[in-house]
Image: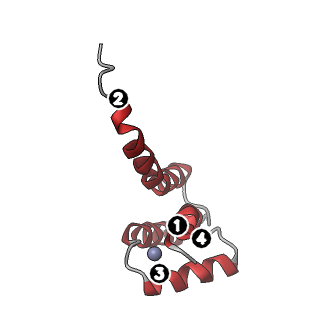
Amino acid sequence: MTCEEVRELAGAYALDTLSPEESRAVDEHLRSCNLHEELVALRATAMLLSRGTEERDPPATLRARILDAASAQRRRRAARRSCGRRRGTAA
Ligand SMILES: [Zn+2]
């Protein structure tokens, strides 16, 4: 599994909704790669919260925040690409 694949699965991994095979593949990648500290922290938080409540699913707001954080990197990359186009358009 590549870093890019891990990022694609980050939200589902943090919420522990991956298939056992995918989850194991991500675990293996994280053991040999230090570039996903955010993801590890997110998952730890999600695990902690879901363990502390009766329900297995984390609250919808947390789910949204995690999915948001997981896609933020992708958005940041896209923003960097289109940055130059913004110049000269200020009214
Ligand atoms: Zn990686």
Q: Which quadrant of the rendered structure holds the N terminus?
A: bottom right
Nearest-to-viewer mark from 2 and 1: 2
Q: Amino acid at mark 3?
A: Leu
Which disc, if any, is residue 16? 4
Residue 41 in picture, x, y percent from top left? 39, 70
Residue 71 x, y percent position in the rendering: 49, 53
Whichever of callouts 3 and 2 sits on the residue coming sooner in the sequence is 3
- Residue 30: mark: 3
- In primary-sequence order, the first of circles 1 and 3 is 1
Q: Secondary structure at mark 2?
A: helix
Q: Tag count in the figure?
A: 4
Q: CA distance from mark 1 to mark 3?
A: 12 Å
- Image position of 48 (left or right of 25): left
Q: State left or right for residue 76 relative to residue 90.
A: right
Q: Which of label 1 and label 3 is nearer to you? A: 1
Q: Which mark is residue 4?
A: 1
Neighbourhood count class around disc 4 (C-alpha, 10 Å): few under 14, some 14–19, many 20 upward: some
Q: Is residue 48 visible?
A: yes
Label 2 packing within 10 angstroms: few (<14), some (14-19), many (20+): few
Secondary element at tag 3? helix
| Distance between the alpha carbons at the discs numbered 2 and 1 | 27 Å
Picture coordinates of residue 22 (x, y %)? 65, 76
CA–CA distance in space, label 4 to label 2: 39 Å
What residue is shown with label 2? 86
- At label 2, the amino acid type is Arg
Of 80 and 38, nearer the camera is 80
How far apart in space, not on screen, are marks 3 and 2 (Cα)? 37 Å
Real-space CA distance between mark 3 and mark 4, rounded to the nearest whole angstrom: 15 Å
Tell me the colour scheme of the image.
secondary structure
Dots 1 and 4: beta carbons under 8 Å? no
Secondary structure category for the residue under label 1: helix
Identify whether 84 is placed above or below 68: above
